[in-house]
Amino acid sequence: MSEVLDTEANLIGRLNVPEFDTLSDDLRQLIEQHGGDNWIRALSLNPDTARRFTQYFEKLFSVANGRLPIDERELIAVVVSRTNGCGLCAIHHAHALGEALRDRVQARRIALDYHLAELSPRQLALAEIAEAITTSPRAITGKDFDRLRSLGLDDADILEAVETASWFNHTNRIFIATGVVPDEKYFSALA
């Protein structure tokens, strides 16, 4: 990994992140809502970015909302993040996938290489479309969508899968470029 700055406030990445107590009340509350994780602390440098990002994230990953079950959205997030090499998002969402599946071992297998995990046909199709969106979106054809339809997804579900994979490609690029380091709690939580 490229250089990480030496000061306490900057141990989370390449940007000069403000100290928590210097932030506005609403931004401190937003950070606390998201567990004080490094990703939200890094985004606090630009409050508008932090607000936009969390608003989209909260809607896309709401357990109660969404067309696809949360475990399928987390599966997509993990596959995209692993494919892109975004350690921050891969470990964070592998943890969330483990909770959604109630199976941390399976989540770790998927995060390491979904080809080695025993996935259902639907999970495998979602993982493969997520990987294709990440690596070669122009190669996706109607046959890929027909496969998803044959596994019980309708077109609105497919659009949400595409949206989830696309949003994670966006997210991964932010955190890879800024060098945000995964929080220690995710390493111990998956051990």
Image: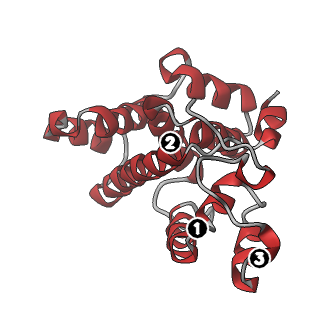
**Mark 3, other Cα within 10 Å: few <14 / some 14–19 / many ≥20:** few
Please say if 172 is above or below 144.
below
Quick one: SS at disc 3? Answer: helix
Q: Which mark is residue 23?
A: none
- Going from N to C along the chain, the mark reached first, 3 or 1, is 3
CA distance for labels 1 and 2: 21 Å
Of the two numbered discs 3 and 2 on the same chain, state the one appearing first in sequence.
3
**Residue found at the very far bottom of the displayed protein:** 25
Badge nearest the viewer, 3 or 1: 3
Neighbour tally class for label 2: few under 14, some 14-19, many 20 plus, Cα within 10 Å: some
Whether residue 86 is situated above or below residue 18 in the rendered picture = above
Q: Mark 3 highlights which residue?
A: 22
Say which quarter of the image contains residue 15: bottom right
Q: Residue drawn 22% across and 39% down?
A: 137
Q: Are marks 3 and 1 in contact (CB under 8 Å)?
A: no
Front residue of this view, candidates 171 and 122: 171
For mark 2, what is the residue?
176
Where residue 30 sits in the image (x, y, percent)?
A: 70, 74
Which amino acid, mark 1?
Answer: Glu
Give the percent coordinates (x, y) of residue 5.
67, 44
- Percent position (x, y) of residue 129? 33, 37
Circle 2 sits in a helix, a strand or a loop, which is it?
helix
Circle nearer the N terminus (1, 2): 1
Q: Of residues 116 and 176, which is closer to you in this image?
A: 176
Q: Look at the picture and state if 113 lies above or below 30.
A: above
